[in-house]
Amino acid sequence: MDKKKVLLVIGFIGVVIVMAVLLYFAFFKRPPAPPPVVVPPEEVEVVRPARLPVTREIWERMTIEERITRGLSVYEFEEERAKEVTVPPTIERRVAPQIDEVAQGGRTWINPISSDPVQGATLAADGQNNVFYDKSTGQFYEIDSFGNKTLLTDQVFYNVSDVNWAPTKDRAIIEYPDGFKVMYDFDKDQQYTLPKNWEEFSWDSAGGRIAFKAMSKYPENTWLAVARPDGSGAKPIEHMGDNADKVTVSWSPNSTIIAFSATGTPRGTWEQELLLIGQHGENFKPLVVDGRGFESRWAPEGDKIAYSVYSADSLYQPRLYIAGASPDNIGENKIATGLATWAHKCAFNNGGSYLYCAVPQFLPEGAGLVAELSENTRDDFYKINTATGEVSFLAEGAMGGYNVRDMYVSGDDSVLYFVDENTERLRSIRLK
């Protein structure tokens, strides 16, 4: 093959290649992709950690690295930054309950008086201190509000079961479990033996005589009687016969009445008449009460009484009443307090205008019939206006409740004293 033919063939091949390239770009090659869109990054707010404020003196002692780490100005102290204060988190604080020193309707301090079990606690003759029998030592003491004790006598009285003080607080009738009874004169340090068959003593307001039941196994020999405190001059007042258990010996402060007798005219299942017995055969108007289990407390002037009774209507729980008790107003101006408590848990103030009572927080049904059902009760304190009948909540004992007995008021009406049944210790609560 000559040279000319070779060049023609090469030229032809070159033309074909060029045509193929042109056809590829014209029909098959994809257009170039558009350049990517660059999205600027979002600005993120940098929250610096909370910091405590610094003074200029502290800032000047810092290194540059420490200032940067703390987020402070590096080269110039900034007064405003120094004033930045981190708000501390809110902390819920426990608020201690308010406890009152003086009873005014809330939780109130109950103050200890004696450190040992006491019996027969009552107000001393000075109207401020207290006298009592100390069961741990077998001796009688006077004690002040600070717990300072003074012996009343050096004589020791072992295993005393009951103490009944004269209003003058210089004498007391002391009883023992075997029925032995003595009257002891603390001023004279002298003891007088009383008959064993004398029971349920009550002193007159002057402390010169005692009323009592003279008991016998023969009903014809049971009498309500009076005598001198040393046992002399005994005088029968009323024959009790088979009704001794229906008689309550209670000498009134005005000396007109010495006992109540539940032997009045029958008035139904629960309502009953109580006869008021005087020293001279007086015919007093009966006191009508709305239940059984009569207990009473005399007002200081003897013009009214507080009493408790139970009935089916009260679920056999005691209910407290106040009524007139002078010969000319017996049973009048009767007040139903609505309080479920016993009269022995109450005490009048010195003018008789108010009655203070310890009232169980809960009483089971039948507590009036079976006193043992109230052994584990805890009492709150109430105040009753004896003229209007208004009842107000006086106090709740702080640091736990107490089962109250032997309650009485100081001579200036500023302190309420009582014995806690569970510990048998003397305690007090301030009224003023």
Image (tube, rainbow, N blue to C red):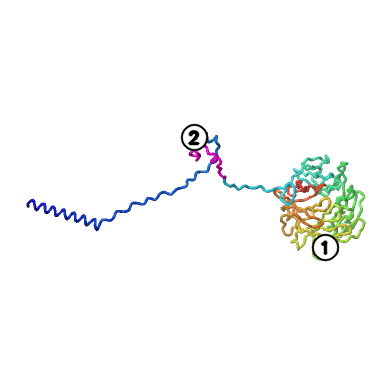
The residues colored magenta run 67-87
Q: Nearer the viewer, residue 206 or 409?
A: 409
Query: Mark 2: few, some, or many residues within 10 Å (few <14, many ≥20)?
Result: few
Q: In front: mark 1 or mark 2? A: 2
Q: Earlier in the sequence, mark 1 or mark 2?
A: 2
Residue at the far left in the pictured view = 2
* Label 2 secondary element: loop
In the visual, does 27 lie left or right of 137?
A: left
* Label 1 secondary element: strand
Q: Which x, y percent locates residue 319?
A: 77, 58
Q: Which x, y percent locates residue 382?
A: 76, 53
Query: Mark 1: few, some, or many residues within 10 Å (few <14, many ≥20)?
Result: many
Q: Is residue 152 magenta?
A: no
Q: Residue at x 72, y 58 (%)?
A: 364
Spatial CA span between label 1 and label 2 = 98 Å
The answer to whether residue 212 shows anywhere in this view is no
In the visual, does 148 lie left or right of 40?
A: right
The answer to whether residue 226 shows anywhere in this view is yes
Residue type, mark 1 in image = Gln
Q: Which x, y percent locates residue 165?
A: 84, 47
Q: Which x, y percent locates residue 287?
A: 85, 60
> Which numbered marker is on residue 272?
1
Residue type, mark 2 in image = Thr
Q: Which residue is labeled 2 in the image?
A: 63
Q: Nearer the viewer, residue 379 or 227?
A: 379
Q: Is residue 76 magenta?
A: yes
Question: How many numbered circles are shown?
Answer: 2
